[in-house]
Amino acid sequence: MTSPPEDRTTELRELFFESAAELVQRLNEQAMRLEKSPGDLEAVRSLRRAVHTLKGDAAACGFRELSELAHEFEDVLTLENPAIAPLVPDVALRAADVFTALLEGYRRKKKLPDIGPLRAEIARLAHPGTDGVVEKKPGKRALPVAHWSEYERMAIDKALEAGQRVYHVRVQLDPQCAMPIAARQMIKVALSALGEVLAVYPSDDAVVNRVEIALASDKSAEQIRTRCRIPTVAQSARVALWQGGTPAETKTATASAEPGTASPSSAADRKAGSGAMPEDLPASTAAPASDNTLRVDAEKIDNVLNLVGELILAKSMWQQMLHEFARRFPKDDLQGKFSDVMAFQARALNDLQRSVMKIRMVPVEQLFRRFPRVVRDVARLCGKEIELVVKGVDTDLDKRILDALAEPLTHLVRNAIGHGIESGEERVRAGKRAQGTLRLNAYHQGNQVVIEVSDDGHGIAVEKVRQRALSQGLLSAEEAGLLTDGETLDLIFRPGFSTAAEITELSGRGVGLDVVQSVLERLKGTVQIDTEAGRGTTFRLRLPLTLAIIKALLFGVERRLYAIPLNSVVEIARTVEDEVHRVENYEVLQLRNQVLPLLRLGAPPPPGADSAGRKIFVLVTSSGDRKFGLMVDTLVGEEELVIKALDDQSISTELVSGASILGDGRVVLILNLLALVERFTKARGNAADSRLAGVLRAAPDLGPPTRTIARGQA
């Protein structure tokens, strides 16, 4: 059963938007490369290739404005005029912005941006000193046979000189195909997965019943033919080795390869490149290597991950039943067999979970590669010279988290250039080089990903932040006096906070870094600031590898069940109420040589001799660079939890970030440590105790008494 034409069109357009975003990113990168090296011919060629491909793809999908604009810009890029070379990078970067806006308009079906100013700039490049319009190349659509442009011939020649195998692929379209332009795009996208598409005929929206492509690829002819076999799109396909000249000038001994057939074996395949005529390539004698790239919608992966989560819940239920069976029938021979089956299932499930998680992982390079352009534009706006240094681009991160980090990282980068790095004159006076340095780094640390944004500027003045917060009414003088340096620095993430003296295009409105904090809270991450006067500042973002499944520590408070991420627990201590002291409205514990602030999750015990010897557990946790202890009644144990989101009707507090279900059916609430610390810092003392205890009483009851795990008992 074939998909209806409208479904196929939607699929083609989604493929186009995905590839077009990559082409625009390449346009940005090559334009910046050309800006640094104006005579770099390879950068110009790469720029032309990106614009040429974007032009053809847009035409195939019916996006006329984008196709025509790219066509005009491509014509300019083919001109070898030294007088306009220094102007090309700026126009190319402006074109990338306009192309992005057009793509957004097409995708969301919004009003398209005005492309007139860019067309005028392109026209001035084409005709220096005039305001004329770029003339389109005449006669291209009237050609009855494939004809490569000079640029396409250059691309083919370069590939051949580099020793690449170049194929001439001719695909006859199905006469019943209702959308020949879209069909050509589908064939081009399919072949681009096997190598580099060097030339395409027709390159515009001419309605012809075939498509001819010059393809540089190390795949066999049979693999290429197999790729072309698209039902209801391709009727036949011919594949020939390129030997020089144009396809229209050479004779081919290639027979049509209908779907399901393979061409006969020939010795010409072993002598590729030695003859004057292209030869048809035979099917490989061995099984052809399959293409290992498969595009899958992220939602489908999420569905699989959700099913893995359900299997993990089922595993917990089986383990609970096994424990109950062992308790009732301690001498039954089946107990050992059940244990073996459970161990095997657990291993297979763990492997399945890791495999699915790896599918979601993408290199952080996909996030970092957009920042050279951001740094360049903001540095120009500020009149500064900034060098961007990027490390750790191969670090993997969950795709959902990576996408969410784009906005906060952009704010941090802009903030570092606008506020952190001094002007060239200031830097020289301070004994630094005039050019500032901004560093982006990513690395794994345990089961977290750390992303750092560092600058070598003047650092953040803690006292200036404190005074600015006071003047803006963000806190009282009494509260300001109680804040540590680290807590004071965290004020820059408050909504409305700004140290800028005046409102500019870059800063001063108090909107920006609060986005960083809110996004990280949503992602269950933390941000830490390290700053040194005169040396610079580092924003260190810590994020979980995934948001779906976590290792958690379960504990009880007043017969209610809670959990926190295991990686945030530094250690577990055992103490008694008598050892808990109050200092400046804080409850604290002397733990070895440190004074540890405590957060009591339950109600304080009534005064009296009986409560003084009451035993409690203290979970020593870390949030950013701060440590504090959670006082809990019992430890239940470690568990792998599948996080289930909660709506506001279930739990209307920010202190709970999610919930999970245990194998015995009990519900456990997962606490938000960041929110707990924030509430603890604001409330202070007894008020904090009572408010937190009141909120947490909304949790489900623990049910029958559970066996506590004596981990960490002193």
Image (cartoon, rainbow, N blue to C red):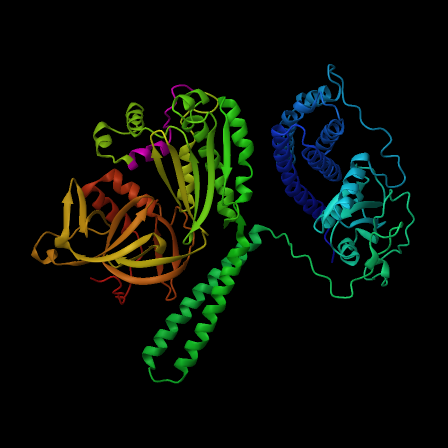
> Residue drawn 72% across and 37% down?
49
> Residue drawn 76% across and 40% down?
155
Q: Residue furthest left?
A: 609
Residue 627 pos. (x, y %): 27, 47
44 on left or right of 644: right
Magenta span of residues? 486-503
* Residue 699 sits inside the magenta stretch: no
Residue 9 pos. (x, y %): 71, 45
Residue 191 pos. (x, y %): 74, 49
Dividing the picture into quadrants, the one containing residue 465 is top left
Which residue is at the front of the view, 493 or 159? 159
258 on left or right of 656: right
Q: Is residue 269 above or below residue 183?
A: below
> Residue drawn 44% across and 20% down?
425
Dividing the picture into quadrants, the one containing residue 643 is bottom left
Q: Is residue 123 above or below residue 155?
A: above
Decide if residue 680 is in sight here. yes
Which residue is at the front of the view, 164 or 291? 164
- Is the C terminus in the top left, top right, bottom left or bottom right quadrant? bottom left
Residue 209 pos. (x, y %): 85, 45
Decide if residue 258 is in sight here. no
